[in-house]
Image (cartoon, rainbow, N blue to C red):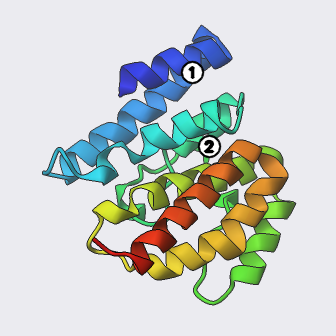
Amino acid sequence: MLERVDTEARAALGDTAARRVRAALAEALALRDAAINDDRDTRLLHPARTIRILIADGACRSADALAAAACLDTIDPALAPEPPPLLRPIVNAVPRADPGADDQLLEQIVTADHDTALLALAERLDHVRHLHLRRDLDPRPLHAQVREVYAPAARRFSAQIARRFDRWADAFERRLVFPR
């Protein structure tokens, strides 16, 4: 996955900037590899998938934002490496979900700068896309948050990310009504 992200980052950013993204991602993946024993665990590739979403669906061309994505995990923060000083302000600026504060979260995302908002959206999109593989999380509050916060916010920043949130939420609702 590191090679795939590197190839996509080079196409989007050029060699020099892509090297920064690759270095941040390599550190993040090494930390996860050391912490997670199951190579099928969906958490292993979270930062790589987030970067791919940012490049492909968010049209993000900021090497700093892409490298910061490697240092961000809003659901499993212990799996995220400490961001280097240059990236720390970006990672810290990403709005986080506080229980019961969805109105504030929506406002924080839509008033964030473009790259910060995209980072918040892509990171959460990757988490919810793999939610069905996690038994340790209750998916219902995350689904509600997608409908009330993330999908509406995404409509302001990326039509493709908004469509992906809507498709995921629709599929999740179908699974609730007609479980297998």
The residue carrying pointer 2 sits among few (fewer than 14), some (14 to 19) or many (20 or more) residues within 10 Å by Cα, namely: some
Query: Residue 9 placed where, x, y %?
Result: 57, 21
Query: Residue 47 placed where, x, y %?
Result: 45, 43
Q: Amino acid at mark 1?
A: Ala
Q: Amino acid at mark 2?
A: Leu
Nearer-the-camera pick, 134 or 113: 134
Q: Quadrant of the N terminus?
A: top left
Q: Secondary structure at mark 2?
A: loop
The residue carrying pointer 1 sits among few (fewer than 14), some (14 to 19) or many (20 or more) residues within 10 Å by Cα, namely: many
Per the image, the residue denoted by label 1 is 9
Q: Quadrant of residue 27?
A: top left
Mark number displayed over residue 55 = none
| Residue at 62% across, 31% down | 56
Foreground mark, 2 or 1, reads: 1
Vertical arrangement, residue 99 with respect to residue 147, above or below? below
Q: Residue furthest bottom?
A: 100
Residue 137 visible in this rendered orientation of the protein: yes
| Residue at 47% across, 81% down | 140
Mark number displayed over residue 87 = 2
Residue 89 visible in this rendered orientation of the protein: no
Say left or right for 119 vs 172. Answer: right
Nearer-the-camera pick, 124 or 28: 124
| Residue at 28% across, 38% down | 30
Say left or right for 119 vs 130. Answer: right
Query: Residue 16 placed where, x, y %?
Result: 60, 12
Vertical arrangement, residue 140 with respect to residue 106, above or below? below
Q: Residue furthest front?
A: 178
Nearer-the-camera pick, 51 or 57: 57
